[in-house]
Structures are given as structure tokens and as C-alpha cells.
């Protein structure tokens, strides 16, 4: 059904006064933003003129010069800040006895509600069992524990907005809801931040402190930053059960991690081995795949790296000659992007079918640096068409080469140490040098020996440690690994069988591919912050020679000692055990979170009642690294999938589509959007961070460009609504502050609508039970049908977890159905004396039901306004909208009238035509009479039921019906609505042709010129040509409208109006209703 952007309802704004002018007892005060000015009463006629000019431009089909996102985000007018100043103790209910402020102000609305919600226990599952609408079903979720490495960003806000909306909906519909809060200790990230801070503030390195002192510094930092994250979650309105808050380094989490490690080890799924790992030389630790950023380089690129004195060039392919032993004039040329690993080469490989090297099969080559003999091996994995077709094999520093070396029995040579320097295996001339300094020395040596064969630009992908900015090395290390094949097969089968549902479903392909190629998971980290590995090395003098180290695992040292005694056959008291100094990968404890947060390994009541979780909602970037590991470990350790449904949302990017990054200056704290912030404060936050000076300069410049005037105050509800309005289950979400500001304007619309409704209801109004409300006017029936349809669409959106459907349905109802149409159309009816009883009851139902539908997305605004509505008679009302029943589609089905809505869409088409006519003839103040003529009897009856709303919404005078076949009065303009319907609008005496004809002629000349220019352009192809043709059609249509308008005005000039002319005094029927339409 088409819906029109009809004139928005707006209550007259009272003139605002500054806070110092208000009496002290006033419930609220106003503050002007630092760079703002007070709002004054708008001139209504000027506003009407602007609206008409806008409508005229739209009707003319003029090119829309839409502002760029950057311009849009800057174009905002500072609003008055209203403060809630009634003394209210923390946790007490907010005083709603005073009138609403004249305009929506987020700080007033959001004050005091959250502490009251928490104190009353509305967010606890125990409270929800007492609700009248209790279903007896449970709904449980855990928040993806944010890293305790600082404050939340806008991506976290999207997670909270989606999860809290779902949680609040389940709670309102009567489910027993548990939403567990928590935060992650983020081992590498936290340690890196604290180390950086210690160096910046005290000039101290980690290794200058002992382990215990350093950990005390980390815990101190965690207490400061952890509280900040909780404050942000509360500001976002997250309805979490704070009594069940978890931290992945808590005592309970430590017990769960130790238990998981021991059980996996006993099951043979966790072992110690020597394998290649991702290694950060700057951090001196293994890192996970998710902490490796793949940076694409188009060719030669210089990068500054930590610990390296000069910039290093990458994206170059260096050609090196390997002489064939016994044939001084024969060589094999190999291309490499990593000449620093040449000392670790143990072979050269070619494809067995490559004819260029067939005669060299089985021969030996001389190493270009050491002269040692290397075998020339053949392997079908070599790509003969890439480079020279010959590749060097370095098993100790390349995953692909490690696999190749294992197949051919080649011993690896580790030539790069943990700190990124060259090892003793490289010889004295390289030992101890930084690997990239050694690179230049190696290339110089190759030139001196005549074995350098050139270099060229070479596109490549460089692995970068996201935590340190250093180039990732692949090193052979003895570490603890989790065997993933068996658990991965079960995880893949769970999705394939439908036991585990991934939404959107297109993620299933990535899931299956990842688990079909999964390798063992390195869980050792060479850090101090984290869960120390519960493994012990048995130190025995007799254990020497080639025997492998003896490691034992235990929940405690005593338990490990018992295991060691059994293995060695010696008394445990005589054994010396050394605990592994490493800690576990952060993802290991995170993978346990869905059940460790509920008390596992103990069989707690929470674990019994709420595990498995009902839903896991998170960002799609965490599907494999977190969700996949939760499924593997959850199934293995608890015997059940940790959840049966996974909802994955998109990544939030900035308005330019860039990933949020501190170094780009585009990471936004949700609170800065909620409360507003000046540019100066944003810049100070950057300076207080841990960015390097070069990164800081880039970020500050970008920030100044994006937010030259700072960020306006938008409020929590607007931010949540804007985030939920996006189709977050598809592609990436590009969010701009201007979108959030638009949602704040929507909040203001709802605010003004409720002020109007409360004014209409008065203090003595008694609502009827919803089931007894029977509308007596067609407009009443229409808005209640729209309300029922909205409830149905919201229910469908929540059931399918597509919150954009919910947001769009609510936006359409409140803005276009209620404010733009019903409130405007009902004003004349409400002004009748006495006022009919039906419309106020309808207004109350729209407010009550509409706010309850809105509450999961906009909890603060919904609570503030709903608390001021009168209560329905009967049982005690819900204490808060957060635990009030959510309107179900079934309960409102008796209001749903699809046929009536279809009929009213025809009325809206008439309104649109009337407004277009008014715009064409620039009728700013006049209210012309209108006649409708239809040859269809049913349509004639339809219009008769809505005559008064037609006049009100079309900004016209009296609207009447012209019998079929009757002649139209002279001096009236005609517009064709369809083959069966004509519209006539009175112009005689309302329009001065002498004034308007020159204006129309000038407008026509301008449009004709645009049309001629478009026609003269050479036709193109694709989307550009489609736009050109659309523009041509639009201009031609507008020109035809102008020609008709000119013709009508010329006819008016020929008409001499006479007093008492019967054609100009036709009886115009007023409003009538048709019960059969109801």
C-alpha cells in the first residue's frame, strides 16, 4: 500500500528558558550546548512555504543534489539539553508526575531509569517467573565478552543493540530470560597495552619487573578499564543480570579452564609437540590466526617495523642463482621475497614435469651462501608457471615448506630466533643481527659472489601482527596443541544435520570449508597475563640424551606429582616439577564461556536450567575463531552443543566503508554519540591513547575532517534504533552519525505525538479494555488496523530475528500512519464539542500498544512515555514497560482490516494529487474547495466515507462529490487520478494568472534547457543510460504538467467571475461515514 510523506504533526513548542531562570522546584531545566543557541518558535507560514518548495522540486523531478555523507553529518543544529533535576536516590523510581518538557531531550529521558530497573530485579530470570504472561519457557544468552583492553566501540554497540532487543522481547512475552554479562582478559592485547603504558609513564620494560609485580599492574589496569566497559553497557541500556557477571580470569573461570585442559589431555586431544607457529618477534610470543592481519602489497612498499632502525622494503622478488654441483656453468635460479631465510634453505624443488629441469633430477646444488650441497627435489605442489618454476625449501620458516620438507624427509634449520635476530646456524657474520638488517647483508654477499640475478616488483600478501605491527615469523616451537580433526568433524556434521543453525545460512559454506581443512590449534602463549598452563616438566638427572622431555598434567601440583610418580616409577616426593611458564591462548577460555559462565564443571542450578544457551549472537568475523571453538569444546566437554542457533551480524564500518581502526581515528565510543562530544575532547582522547606519534597525527587529521564540529547529542534510543534499522545480517554496515541523528528526530516525533495524546486524554480519562474498543469512524478503524498490522510485522521480525523489519514497521507506523495521517486527520474531530468518545480511546490504544511494541528497541523513551499513560481498569498494571506484555498479533487480530487499508491507500493517492496541484499553483495559504468525480459507484462511496480527512490531509477546504457525467464548474483545475476518477480544485479567485504565468514560463524555460542538454548527450550504456532515460521521462512529465497549468491559468484569465454564479456556489457535502467499510 502506498504511503505518503504527508505533513508531519508538530505540537507548538513552548519558548524555552535557561536553567537559571526556572524556579528551583521545576522538575527539569534546560542547557544550551557549548556551541549551540536556543530554539525559537518557528514561523509556521515560512515552514509551510519551505515544504511547498520542496514538494515543487520533487514534483518537477529536478536533480537531487544529495549531500555527501560527510556534509550530512556536519549539517546539524544544536538542541537544548533538558536535565531531570528532581532529587531521586540511586535505584528509586523516577518521578513522572510533572509535565513532559516541550521537546525531546535524551539526557532527561534516560535519567534514573536504569538503576531502578536493576534494583527492582526486572533483568533477573527469578523475577520473570512471577509475570502474569509467564510462558514457562527459558531464553538464555551470553554477551560475547568484550576485551578488557579499553572501551567499547560502535561494533560492540551493534552487538548490544541486537541482543538487548531480542532479550527484552522474550522477557516481555513472558519467557524466563537470562542474559549473562562478562568480559575477556584478552591476554596478548592487555599485556601489550600495559607494557606500552608502563614504558610511556615509567620507562620500565616488563622483564625489568618480576612476574608477580607485572601481574599486579595488569590487575590494577583491569579494575580501571573493566568498570568503564560496565558503564558503557549500562549507558546502552543492556538488560543484563549483573549479579551473574563473569570475567575470564575469575576463580570460577580458572577452575573451568584447568578442568578443560586436564580432560582434553586425558582424552588424547591435547598434546605437546614441536611445530611451526605464528610468532610475533616484538611480543616474543606465539599468536593466533585472528591476530595475523594479511596486508596486500601491490609491489615495492616501505614499512617501519618495531625494533628495526630503518624502513624495510617489501613487495620485491629477488632472483638468486644456485650453481649445479659439478657443472660450473649451470645454475638454477630461484625467486624469493625473503632472502633473510636463505641460510635456512635445505633443498630446491621443481615440478617433476617441468622440462627445463628434467635433466637435473637427482642432482645436487651448491648453496649460494655456504657452498653446502642441497638436493634438487621434485614435487607436484610446485607451480611451474610461477617465476622460474624453481622454489627454495625452508621448512623451519614456511608452513608450505614444512609440509614439503616432511614429505621428503628434510631436516629443518631454524635461522631466526624468538627476538627476530639471526641464530648461530647462520655463521658469525650474521648471528645476532636483526633479520631485516641481515637481509641487506645477504643481498650484498650475493652480489659480491656473482649469484645475484636481479629484483623486480612483486605483489604479495604480508602477514602482520595486529597487536604489535611487526611482520609475523613462522618459527618451530615446542608448544601445547589441541587436536581438532575429530571435534571439527562433529561441528561440521552438526550444521549439516541441522542440529546447529547458522543464520544467515550463507555462512554454512565457510563453516564447512574451515572444518574440512582444520589443523591442530596451538594454545601456548609466551605471556605472563592469562591462565597459566597446568602442565609440569619432570626434571630428572637421569632423563638425558635423546629422550624427550617428560611432561605431566594435573589440576594441582599434587595431582601432577601423582601422575609423574606413576610414569617414572619413583616416589612423588623425590621428583622435581617445574610448571610451564606459558599461559593459554585467550580463545581457549573464551571457548568455554557459554558453560563456564553458568558454573561448569559443577552441576549448578544455572547450568541445569539454562544450558545449552537458546541463542548465540555475535559478529560474523568471530564465526570460526570463537563460535567454531565453542562448538568443538562445548560438545566435547559437556556432551551437548553449547547452543542450537547462531545469529551473525555484519561488521560496522564508517560512512566511507572503512574498517574501524584507532590509527584511522574513526573508532567511536558509543557514549560520544549518546551524549555528544566536542572535537577538542575527541582529539584529547586520541592523545591519551597508546598511538605512536605518526599514527596519532594521521588519526587526528582524519578525525578533524570527519567531525569538524564534534558529534551532536543523539541519545541511546536513537543509536540503538539506527543500528537495528540496518539489515545487519547481510553485507557490512556503513554507519554515519547523520543516520543516528535522523533517529533522534524520530524520537522527537514520538515525543510530540505523546504530548498531544496526553493533552487530549486529560487527567480524568479512563481507558477501555482493548477487546471492547470498537471504532465508530473510518479513520479510527484504519489506524487500529495499521496498529494490528504493525504488531504482526514486529512479531514476524522478532521470530525471524530480522530487527530491521521491526524497526521499519515501527518507524512507518509512528511517523507515517500515526503522526502524518491519523493525528492530522483527527484534529478537526477532536475539536468538535462535545468531543466524540471514540477517538481518545483510539489514541490511548495507539500510544499504549505502540510504545510496548517500541520498548525492546527504544527502552528509555518507551518507559518515560508509557509511565505517564493512564492505567487500564482491572488487574494491577505492570510496574515497568520492560516487563509489560508485548502485544501479540493474535491479540490485535480483531482490529486488522486489510480491505479497509487497501481502500484508504486510494484516499492517500487523492491526497498526493491534491498536494501536487497545490504545489503547481503555489497555493500557500488558500484552502481551495475540491470535487471528486468517479464513474465507479464503489469508489464514489469510498471517497464519501473520507471527505473530511481528505480536506484536512490535502490542506484544502470543503471536499465534495460530483455526480458521474456532471460538468465541472468553470474556473476549477482538473487532474486525472485514474481512468475512472477525476479531481477538480477551485482556482478562480485564489490564483492571480498575471502573477503566476511568468513564473511558470521561467520554470518551463529552465526545464526545457535541461531536457535539450540531456537529449544532446550521446547515449551510453548500463546504469548511466538508465538514469539518463529516467531523467528524460521525469523532465517530459513535468513539462506536460506545466503546459496544463499554463493552459488552466489562461482559461482563468478569460473567465469573468460574477457574483452569485451558481457554478461557484455548488453545495459541497461534508464528512460522512460508511459503516460497511468498517
Image (spheres, grey):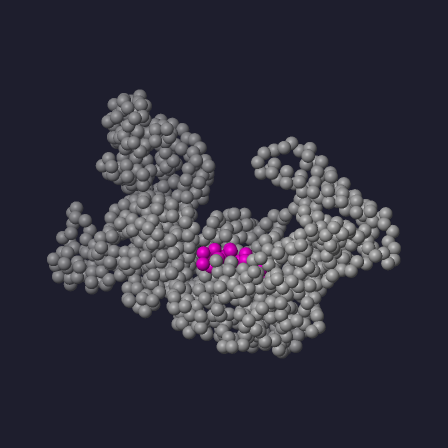
Regarding residue 738, the answer to whether it shows in the image is no
Magenta-colored span: 797-814
Q: Residue at x 24, y 62 (%)?
A: 555
Judge by depth and name the residue closer to the eye, 891 or 121.
891
Q: Is residue 799 part of the magenta span, yes or no?
A: yes
- Residue 610 in the figure: left or right of residue 998: left
Question: x%, y% of residue 1017?
Answer: 66, 33
Question: x%, y% of residue 702?
Answer: 55, 50
Judge by depth and name the residue closer to the eye, 186 or 512.
512
Residue 299 picture quarter: top left
Q: Quadrant of the C terminus?
A: bottom right
Question: x%, y% of residue 403?
Answer: 28, 39
Q: How many marks?
A: 0
Question: x%, y% of residue 142?
Answer: 39, 61
- Residue 922 in the figure: left or right of residue 213: right
Q: Residue at x 70, y 46 (%)?
A: 60
Overall secondary structure of the magenta stretch? helix
Residue 76 picture quarter: bottom right
Regarding residue 146, the answer to whether it shows in the image is yes
Outermost residue to the left: 569
Q: Residue at x 86, y 47 (%)?
A: 1054
Q: Is residue 823 part of the magenta span, yes or no?
A: no
Amino acid at each position: 500500500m502506498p504511503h505518503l510523506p504527508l505533513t508531519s504533526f508538530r505540537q507548538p513548542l513552548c519558548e524555552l528558558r535557561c536553567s537559571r531562570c526556572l524556579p528551583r522546584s521545576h522538575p527539569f531545566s534546560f542547557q544550551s550546548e557549548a556551541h549551540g543557541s536556543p530554539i525559537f518558535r518557528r514561523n509556521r507560514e515560512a515552514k509551510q512555504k519551505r515544504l511547498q518548495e520542496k514538494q515543487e522540486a520533487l514534483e518537477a523531478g529536478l536533480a537531487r543534489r544529495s549531500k555527501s555523507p560527510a556534509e550530512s553529518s556536519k549539517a546539524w543544529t544544536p538542541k537544548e539539553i533538558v536535565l531531570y533535576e528532581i532529587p531521586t536516590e540511586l535505584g528509586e523510581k523516577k518521578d513522572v508526575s510533572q509535565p513532559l518538557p516541550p521537546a525531546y531531550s535524551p539526557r532527561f529521558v534516560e535519567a534514573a531509569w536504569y538503576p531502578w530497573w536493576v534494583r527492582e530485579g526486572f533483568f533477573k530470570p527469578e523475577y520473570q517467573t512471577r509475570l502474569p504472561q509467564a510462558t514457562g519457557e527459558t531464553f538464555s544468552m551470553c554477551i560475547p565478552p568484550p576485551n578488557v583492553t579499553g572501551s567499547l566501540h560502535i561494533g560492540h554497540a551493534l552487538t548490544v543493540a541486537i541482543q538487548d532487543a531480542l532479550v527484552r522481547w522474550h522477557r516481555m512475552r513472558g519467557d524466563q530470560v537470562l542474559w549473562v554479562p562478562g568480559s575477556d582478559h584478552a591476554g596478548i592485547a592487555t599485556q601489550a597495552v600495559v607494557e606500552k603504558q608502563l614504558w610511556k609513564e615509567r620507562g620500565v620494560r616488563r622483564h625489568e619487573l618480576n612476574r608477580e609485580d607485572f601481574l599486579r599492574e595488569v590487575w590494577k589496569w583491569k579494575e580501571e578499564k573493566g568498570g568503564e566497559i560496565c558503564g558503557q553497557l549500562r549507558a546502552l541500556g543492556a538488560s543484563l543480570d549483573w549479579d551473574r557477571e563473569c570475567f575470564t580470569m575469575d576463580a570460577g573461570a580458572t577452575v573451568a579452564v584447568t578442568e578443560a585442559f586436564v580432560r582434553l589431555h586425558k582424552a588424547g586431544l591435547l598434546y605437546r609437540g614441536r611445530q611451526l607457529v605464528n610468532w610475533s618477534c616484538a611480543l616474543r610470543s606465539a599468536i593466533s590466526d585472528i591476530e595475523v592481519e594479511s596486508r596486500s602489497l601491490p609491489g615495492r612498499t616501505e614499512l617501519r617495523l618495531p625494533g628495526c632502525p630503518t624502513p624495510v622494503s617489501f613487495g620485491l622478488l629477488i632472483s638468486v642463482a644456485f650453481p649445479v654441483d659439478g657443472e660450473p656453468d649451470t645454475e638454477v635460479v630461484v625467486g624469493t621475497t625473503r632472502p633473510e631465510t636463505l641460510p635456512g634453505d635445505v633443498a630446491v624443488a621443481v615440478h617433476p614435469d617441468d622440462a627445463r629441469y628434467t635433466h637435473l633430477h637427482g642432482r645436487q646444488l651448491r648453496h649460494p651462501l655456504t657452498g653446502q650441497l642441497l638436493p634438487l627435489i621434485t614435487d607436484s605442489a610446485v607451480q611451474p608457471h610461477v617465476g622460474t618454476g624453481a622454489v627454495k625449501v625452508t621448512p623451519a620458516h614456511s608452513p608450505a615448506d614444512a609440509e614439503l620438507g616432511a614429505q621428503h624427509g628434510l631436516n629443518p634449520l631454524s635461522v631466526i630466533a624468538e627476538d627476530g635476530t639471526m641464530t648461530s646456524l647462520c655463521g658469525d657474520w650474521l648471528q645476532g643481527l636483526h633479520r631485516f638488517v641481515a637481509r641487506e647483508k645477504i643481498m650484498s654477499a650475493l652480489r659480491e659472489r656473482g649469484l645475484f640475478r636481479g629484483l623486480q616488483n612483486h605483489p604479495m600478501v604480508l602477514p602482520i601482527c595486529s597487536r604489535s605491527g611487526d611482520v609475523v615469523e613462522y618459527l618451530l616451537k615446542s608448544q601445547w596443541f589441541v587436536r581438532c580433526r575429530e571435534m571439527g568433524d562433529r561441528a561440521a556434521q552438526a550444521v549439516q544435520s541441522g542440529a546447529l543453525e547458522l543464520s544467515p545460512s550463507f555462512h554454512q559454506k565457510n563453516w564447512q570449508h574451515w572444518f574440512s581443512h582444520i589443523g591442530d590449534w596451538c594454545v601456548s602463549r609466551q605471556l605472563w597475563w592469562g591462565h597459566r598452563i597446568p602442565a609440569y616438566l619432570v626434571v630428572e638427572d637421569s632423563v638425558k640424551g635423546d629422550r624427550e622431555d617428560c611432561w605431566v598434567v594435573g589440576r594441582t601440583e599434587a595431582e601432577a606429582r601423582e601422575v609423574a610418580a606413576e610414569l617414572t616409577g619413583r616416589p612423588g616426593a623425590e621428583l622435581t616439577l617445574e610448571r610451564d611458564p606459558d599461559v593459554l591462548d585467550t580463545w581457549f577460555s573464551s571457548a568455554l564461556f557459554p558453560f563456564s559462565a553458568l558454573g561448569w564443571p559443577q552441576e549448578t542450578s544455572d547450568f541445569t536450567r539454562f544450558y545449552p544457551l537458546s541463542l548465540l549472537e555475535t559478529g560474523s568475523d568471530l564465526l570460526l575463531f570463537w563460535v567454531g571453538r565453542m562448538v568443538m569444546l562445548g560438545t566435547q566437554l559437556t556432551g551437548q552443543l553449547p547452543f542450537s542457533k547462531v545469529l551473525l551480524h555484519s561488521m560496522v564500518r564508517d560512512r566511507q566503508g572503512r574498517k574501524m581502526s584507532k590509527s584511522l581515528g574513526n573508532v567511536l565510543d558509543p557514549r560520544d554519540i549518546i551524549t555528544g562530544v566536542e572535537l577538542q575532547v575527541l582529539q584529547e582522547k586520541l592523545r591519551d591513547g597508546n598511538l605512536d606519534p605518526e599514527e596519532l597525527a594521521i588519526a587526528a587529521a582524519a578525525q578533524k575532517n570527519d567531525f569538524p564540529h564534534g558529534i551532536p547529542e543523539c541519545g541511546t534510543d536513537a543509536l540503538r534504533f539506527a543500528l537495528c534499522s540496518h539489515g545487519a545480517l547481510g553485507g557490512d554496515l556503513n554507519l554515519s552519525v547523520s543516520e543516528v541523528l535522523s533517529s533522534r528526530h524520530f524520537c522527537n516525533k514520538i515525543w510530540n505525538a505523546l504530548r498531544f495524546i496526553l493533552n487530549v486524554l486529560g487527567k480524568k480519562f479512563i481507558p477501555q479494555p482493548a477487546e471492547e474498543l470498537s471504532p465508530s469512524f473510518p479513520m479510527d478503524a484504519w489506524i487500529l488496523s495499521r496498529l494490528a498490522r504493525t504488531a504482526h510485522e514486529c512479531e514476524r521480525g522478532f521470530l525471524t530475528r530480522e530487527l530491521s523489519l521491526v524497526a521499519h514497521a515501527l518507524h512507518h507506523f509512528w511517523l507515517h500512519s500515526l503522526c502524518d495521517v491519523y493525528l492530522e486527520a483527527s484534529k478537526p474531530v477532536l475539536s468538535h464539542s462535545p468531543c466524540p468518545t471514540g477517538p481518545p480511546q483510539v489514541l490511548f490504544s495507539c500510544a499504549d500498544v505502540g510504545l510496548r511494541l517500541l520498548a525492546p528497541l527504544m527502552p528509555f523513551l518507551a518507559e518515560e512515555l508509557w509511565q505517564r499513560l493512564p492505567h487500564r481498569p482491572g488487574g494491577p498494571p505492570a510496574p515497568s514497560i520492560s516487563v509489560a506484555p508485548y502485544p501479540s498479533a493474535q491479540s490485535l487480530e480483531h482490529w486488522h482490516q486489510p480491505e479497509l487499508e487497501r481502500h484508504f491507500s486510494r484516499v492517500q493517492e487523492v491526497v498526493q494529487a491534491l498536494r501536487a496541484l497545490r504545489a503547481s499553483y503555489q497555493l500557500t495559504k488558500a484552502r481551495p474547495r475540491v470535487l471528486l468525480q468517479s464513474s465507479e459507484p464503489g469508489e464514489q462511496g469510498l471517497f464519501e466515507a473520507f471527505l473530511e480527512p481528505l480536506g484536512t490531509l490535502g490542506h484544502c477546504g470543503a471536499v465534495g462529490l460530483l455526480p458521474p457525467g456532471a460538468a465541472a464548474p468553470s474556473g476549477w483545475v482538473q487532474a486525472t487520478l485514474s481512468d475512472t476518477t477525476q479531481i477538480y480544485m477551485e482556482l478562480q479567485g485564489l490564483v492571480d494568472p498575471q502573477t503566476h504565468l511568468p513564473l511558470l514560463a521561467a520554470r518551463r524555460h529552465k526545464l526545457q534547457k535541461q531536457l535539450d542538454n540531456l537529449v544532446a548527450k550521446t547515449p551510453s550504456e548500463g546504469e548511466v543510460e538508465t538514469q539518463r532515460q529516467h531523467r528524460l521521462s521525469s523532465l517530459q512529465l513535468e513539462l506536460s504538467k506545466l503546459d496544463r497549468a499554463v493552459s488552466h491559468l489562461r482559461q482563468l484569465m478569460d473567465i469573468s467571475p460574477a457574483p452569485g454564479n451558481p457554478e461557484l456556489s455548488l453545495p459541497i457535502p461534508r464528512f460522512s461515514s460508511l459503516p460497511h467499510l468498517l
